[in-house]
Image (cartoon, rainbow, N blue to C red):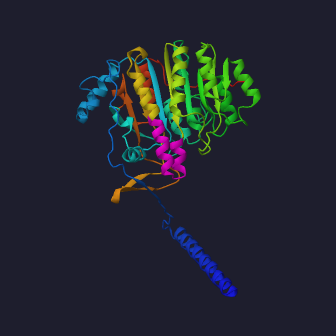
Amino acid sequence: MRNALRRAGRVFMALCTLVVVLAGMVYVVGQVMGIPVRITYQTVASAELPEDQQPAPALPTDSAAALPTGSSADFGSVADSNAAATHAETAAPAVQNVVLFIGDGMGLSMLATVDALAGRRLAMSRMPVTGLVRTNSRSGPISDSGAGGTAFATGFKTTNATIGMTPDGQARRTILEAAARRDSFATGIVTTSYLTDATPAAFLAHVRDRDLYDPIARQMIASRADVLLGGGQPTVFTDSLRRAARRRRFAVGDSLEGFRGAGARGDSAARWLGLFPERAGRFDKMHGPPLPEVTAAALQKLRQRGERFFLLVEQEGTDAAGHINRLPNTRRDLRELDRAVAQVLRFAARPATGRTLVLVAADHDTGGLALTDTEGGRATVRWNTFSHTATWTPLLAYGPGAQRFTGVMPNTALPRRLARLLGLEGFPQGETQIREAR
């Protein structure tokens, strides 16, 4: 019996070896003869369909947040939309504050799939103005977060893995830096990833490679940002760098509760540097308290710090889930982002909070997720890659100036249009000076 099992094992291994060798031969012959031979795959998952899906909560409305009648948000003809956009170029409404959400890796199909599987439709689905973003970089049709974040931050295209610079090595001033140079503006970043990860880094740092975490961290601390809340790498944010941050009037902490206490005491002079540890039970890029809580705390702090504010909020989990083709993680993290968006939409609708524009965007698509079947009360979804795709991404807008973000646009258009609405003359600008904390 034992000998028979050994023989069976040897036969099985021989067959496996033969299959691998034949596949290799087919690939080599195909390459030599110029025949494109590619290995393709799909990751298939399933989920229960909601029996009675509830509509998304109605958007709060007031005079500051309402869209003008007859704008492109009324979903009229293409000619009507173009006319509205042209009018907006010459008569842009005043915008006091901006909250820009970035769902990293959140392609249009990912958003639609999670919305279809939700027991209650996403609050984002109620946002009245929609656009589409072309995400290609100077490296080709498929962008990474470095190039995508840089386009959103500076208004310039760049190569993949580059942060805050054009391909020729020129450091370009970001829209967050331009806003922070105004005395009336408070600025901040919230992320569920490391603070030095590509997307948040692109708004405050300028380096040739996204993996240069130490100079990224030093440049972020040397910036004029008022709030920086995200994951802190102990190997990057060392004790000496934390001391440098304190010298620049940052309150440094590893929990949100400590900052709330500082805010309650009226310590508005100190800036915030939150270096949160990883969340228990989450995979390795998820940091800090739930995103809605951190976003609310950041909003409160920014309102203390300035008459106007610009807040960037990133959900990294959608990208990380796409890279490992995990539908449960995708649903969980996109819905967490949606809860933060819903909270800010309610904030923006209150007259006392000023004229606040809320934008939801994505730097690229990750995973190529698609819902393909709904038989038997279950949905079948398919992932087409573990990497990024060239799929256009959604752009959703609510508030004054929202109609400026309709249609199909390059990712570089977003900060340029924002700058005009905010009155940031001269943006986008040429080379800027790089400062690092010591």
Which residue occupies the foreground of this view, 286 or 264? 264
Confirm whether the magenta stretch covers residue 332.
Answer: yes
Q: Quadrant of residue 56?
A: top left
Question: Taking the image as drawn, is residue 163 in sight?
Answer: yes
Residue most extreme to the front: 51
Which residue occupies the foreground of this view, 336 or 427? 336
| Residue at the image position 64 percent from the left and 78 percent from the top | 13
| Residue at the image position 55 percent from the left and 29 percent from the top | 294
Q: Is residue 266 above or below residue 24?
A: above
Q: Is residue 134 above or below residue 400?
A: below
Which residue occupies the foreground of this view, 162 or 234? 234
Q: Position of residue 169 (x, y in %)?
A: 61, 34
Which residue occupies the foreground of this view, 357 or 327? 327
Classified by dominant secondary structure, the portion drawn in magenta counts as helix
Confirm whether the magenta stretch covers residue 428.
Answer: no
User: Which residues make up the magenta segment?
Assistant: 317-338
| Residue at the image position 51 percent from the left and 22 percent from the top | 299
Q: Position of residue 186 (x, y in %)?
A: 54, 18
Which quadrant of the figure contains the C terminus?
top right
Which quadrant of the figure contains the N terminus?
bottom right
Q: Position of residue 233 (x, y in %)?
A: 68, 36
Residue most extreme to the right: 240
Q: Position of residue 192 (x, y in %)?
A: 57, 36
Question: How many numbered marks are there?
Answer: 0
Left or right, 116 with respect to 363, comes to: left
Left or right, 8 with respect to 129, comes to: right
Question: Taking the image as drawn, is residue 408 in sight?
Answer: no
Q: Is residue 83 above or below residue 373?
A: above
